[in-house]
Image (tube, grey):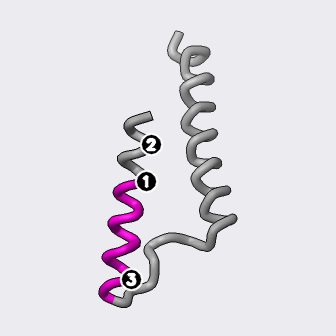
Amino acid sequence: MQEVLLAVLAGLIVGFVFALIKLPIPAPPALPGIAGIVGIYLGYKLFQWILPYFSG
């Protein structure tokens, strides 16, 4: 849970700084961004699940 809170805090700070210096946010649009993050996570977990079958 601490990792989640630190990640949210880091995101808030980065978002604030980007808004302060008037830059666009360094993230994709909301839904595609979330879908991409979920896809990356699921791909990582799939690799971990499949790897033992091929490592002999």
Quick check: is 46 in the magenta stretch?
no
Contact? badges 1 and 2 (CB < 8 Å): yes
Q: Which residue is labeled 2 in the image?
A: 4
Residue type at numbered disc 3: Ala
Q: Which residues are magenta?
A: 9-21
Circle number at residue 8: 1
x then y, percent, for residue 42: 63, 39
Report the magenta stretch's main SS.
Answer: helix
Residue 14, by quadrant, is bottom left
Circle 1 residues within 10 Å: few <14, some 14–19, many ≥20: few
x then y, percent, for residue 10: 35, 57
User: Can you say whether 16 is above or below 11 in the image?
Assistant: below
Residue occupying image coordinates x 44% and y 42%: 4
21 left or right, relative to 11? left
Q: Nearer the viewer, residue 44 or 38?
A: 38
Q: CA distance from mark 1 to mark 3?
A: 16 Å
Circle number at residue 19: 3
User: Can you say whether 29 is above or below 38 in the image?
Assistant: below
Q: Residue furthest bottom?
A: 22
Residue type at numbered disc 1: Val
x then y, percent, for residue 13: 33, 65
Sooner in the amino-acid sequence: mark 2 or mark 3: 2
Sooner in the amino-acid sequence: mark 1 or mark 3: 1
Circle 3 residues within 10 Å: few <14, some 14–19, many ≥20: few
x then y, percent, for residue 36: 62, 57
Secondary structure beneath label 3? helix
Residue 19, by quadrant, is bottom left
8 left or right, relative to 29? left
